[in-house]
Image: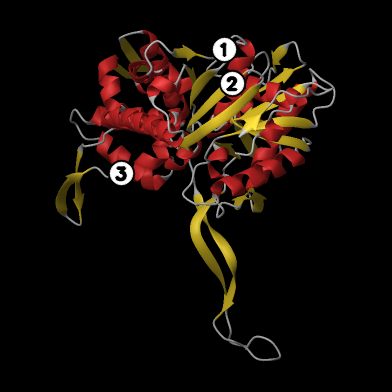
Amino acid sequence: MIFNPDKSSPKAGIGIDFGTSNSAAAVFDGERLRLVNLAGEQAIMPSANYIERDFSILIGQAAIDEYIAGNQGRRVELSAEVLGEARTSAGSADGPAADSETTKVFGQAFNDTGLPGRLFRGTKRLLGNPSSERTPIFERQFRLVALVTPILVGIRHAIERLVDGAGHACIGHPVNFEGGERSRNQVALARLGEAYRHAGIVEQCYCPEPTAAAISYLHEHPEADDERLLTVDFGGGTLDFCILRRTGATFEVEATHGIALGGDKIDQSIFRELIFPLLGKGERWTRVVDGTEVDTLFPFGDFEELLINWPVSYMLNQNKYTAPVMQRMAQSDDGAIKFRRLYDLINQNYSYQVFEAIKAFKAQLSINDTAVLDIPEIDVEVHLERWEFEVLISDMLFELEQAITLVLAKAQLSADDIDIVLRTGGSSLIPAVKDILENQFSGKVVEHDPFTSVAAGLAIADYFNYADQILE
């Protein structure tokens, strides 16, 4: 498909990059490109919202802070949900039989009666799943669209502080939304469009995120004429590619590709490989059961998924999890200290702090050959060489290499046909990612605004009406 910068908009172009982990927005008036401060003086805002028991809503970092404050040291007590009433007799046409007895029918025990609020982050991941339609929140059913809308409302309000009339925007989206359903992209875009309309952004156009990054680069570099660009957009949730060529006043998108691989998956892998062994994974557990001494591996697998998904890790602070941890940490061996760490992490809900430390650790490894994963909350300090980190994520690096091969094949091109390779997205800063690209496209790789290039390109596309001609 080919699109031309044939007309500009009489109003400012607006671009919104609603991301899996973070969001950004930009405004372009034909001359000046401005990033929108979504979080105080910051252009980047976490894509998070927090719904309190009175159904008031916080978004961004305020949502995360409220979630942490409300769950530190809070014991989770689950109660059974009443589904209805049943009688021991069928009764008669005139009513229940005299000897009938009414009993309540209970569902699975999952109602956290003391829960102060629910945090939602990474909701973008669910948009393409048709079965993820409604979520019960404090006895109300919330549509998935309703969980996305408050974040977009906050973004629109921030944009309105810069321009009049933020009822339109160019909306970014991954090449492929996460999920296994063939209809996931259509389902996700329909939901996204509805959420934007509810947020007051009714005039919409769409552009794949890596294409938007390429547009922003070409706008900054008008000298890059008759050159073919490969954009590698490695974000928090997805890894997206676009091959685009500009010839004179026209642009042609020759291929796009995307897979469900992002920085969040790398962070979880670090948690599993480096931190789980320090929390008791692999340790044995000796206790007396029915008068007999039993020695087994500690059932750490029961904890893993909740630990690496920090928005729901507070669920570990209930007796069925904490009781075995307390029994194990009371034993007088070297492993007991690991379970003390695990208990502290659960009791104080430190999973978010762990992931923030992991992100800082990755940033260190991007500039140094050695880094320290320092988590003082649970007394963890891990020293790691960069090469060890690269071994740890080697499977994901291989996925990157395969994806590059595939997008080139889709365009029927070789690496020699590419003139410029754009690295963007937070995970593109990983040195091993840079090395892979440099090895295949020597001397052609440039870094391009890792966290804001997509929002900028969307604003430019909105101003010039590029996206009206993009059909992918």
Residue denoted by label 1: 224
Residue in front for this viewpoint, 90 or 288:
90
Q: Nearer the viewer, mark 2 or mark 3?
A: 2
Q: Is mark 1 on a helix, strand or loop?
A: loop
- Residue placed under numbered mark 3 in the picture: 301
How far from the left and from the top, in percent, is residue 428? 44, 20
Secondary structure of the residue carrying numbered label 3: helix
**In which quadrant of the rendered view does residue 307 lie?**
top left
Numbered label attached to residue 46:
none
Q: The C terminus appears in which quarter of the rendering?
A: top right
Looking at the image, is mark 3 or mark 1 earlier in the sequence?
1
Question: In percent of the image, x 26 and y 27: which residue is there?
Answer: 337
Return the disc, 2 or 3, that comes first in the chain's sequence: 2
Q: Mark 2 points at which residue?
A: 246
Identify residue type, mark 2: Arg
Q: At 50% across and 31% down in the image, what residue appears?
A: 72
Residue 335 in the image: x percent, y percent?
A: 21, 31
For the residues labelled 3 and 1, the Cα–Cα distance comes to: 52 Å
Query: What's the colour scheme?
Result: secondary structure
